[in-house]
Image (cartoon, coloured by chain):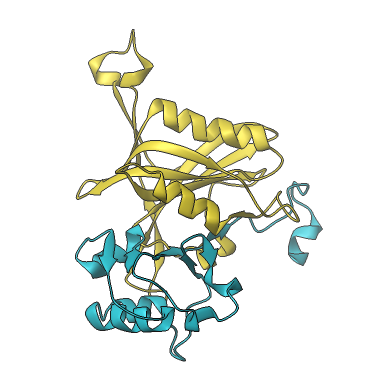
Chain colours: A yellow, B cyan
Amino acid sequence: MLHIDYANYEALRAHGEETYPHECCGVLLGKSDAKGNHVKQIVRAGNTRTDSAHNRYNIAPQELVKIQRQARGLDIVGFYHSHPDHPAQWSATDFAEAHWMGCSYVITAVAKGKAEVTNSFLLTGSSEEDKRFVDQAIEIDVKAAGAGVSAEEETELKGQA
Amino acid sequence: MNIHIPTPLRTYTAGAETVSVPGATVAEVFSNLTTEYPELKQQLFSNDGKLRSFVNVYLNDEDLRYLPEKEATTVAQADELTIIPSIAGGADRMAECVCCSCCSLL
């Protein structure tokens, strides 16, 4: 499961709206344990695929190194990007370019500039030869959203759309 | 010298974020690294012994691919290597397309 607080969840979705019709991308920092990946911070990254930013993204390795160095005790537990006017499902390119086993790949569909479905996929396997994406439920912690939220509503479980 | 290990590869370094390995060149350091942590070899290198295309290696702030001597570059104890797999992807269609025949061209 991917655990993320409401503010970060909304921030990564808003990023996709801001960059529309281009793809946004970023890094999920946090910790992993037996219960899944826990996001503590998201870091926006630049999309270097300016030649085809509407349907491709790439984070410069140097930027990734910088993010990792400045993570301050957190680990890279996943990545996010948007699919402008396209479903929130991983594509053949997403799969071919996925190399971070154990990490969450979060995809938000942005339709006509508005963030819609957000899904997460866990990259599993032990090597390039046997890797695969599996659907990963997202648990959104809405405590940070504050007043008026009942105990029952504090955690929203979001399954795959 | 210290080598920074990315999250997915820490499984093969007993969870260590950074490991210290001796060597006079980058190639020597990698050889010693994969001797000490044998499971890393398949992760980092293809069958022909070359670094996998998606594995980026930085010597301090320099991309190894752009160093004149590449893996033969000499290193000092105080230098640091960072291994960082690439991250990329994207939807496999044109954003302008809302369902038309052009999809079949992609």
In the current view of this chain or complex, which residue is farthest to the top?
Answer: A148
Q: Is residue B29 above or below residue B106?
A: below
Task: State which quadrant residue B69 falls in.
Answer: bottom right
- Classify the position of the N terminus of chain A by image quarter: top left
Query: How far across and down, in percent of the image, does residue B77 sit?
Result: 34, 69
Residue lying at 77% horizontally and 49% vertically, measured from the top left: B97
Task: State which quadrant residue B6 falls in.
Answer: bottom left
Residue lying at 28% horizontally and 58% vertically, measured from the top left: B17
Q: Is residue A145 above or below residue B31?
A: above
Residue lying at 58% horizontally and 34% vertically, measured from the top left: A15
Number of marks drawn: 0
Using the image as rendered, state which of residue A68 and residue B69 is in the foreground: B69
Q: Is residue B104 above or below residue A121?
A: below
Q: Is residue A58 above or below residue A22?
A: below
Query: How far across and down, in percent of the image, does residue A62 sit?
Result: 54, 56
Residue lying at 80% horizontally and 58% vertically, measured from the top left: B101
Asked if residue A27 lies left or right of residue A4, the reply is: right
Asked if residue A150 lies left or right of residue A133, the reply is: left
Task: State which quadrant residue A4 falls in.
Answer: top left
Asked if residue B80 lies left or right of residue A55, the reply is: left
Query: How far across and down, in percent of the image, does residue A114 sit?
Result: 63, 30
Using the image as rendered, state which of residue B106 and residue B46 is in the foreground: B46
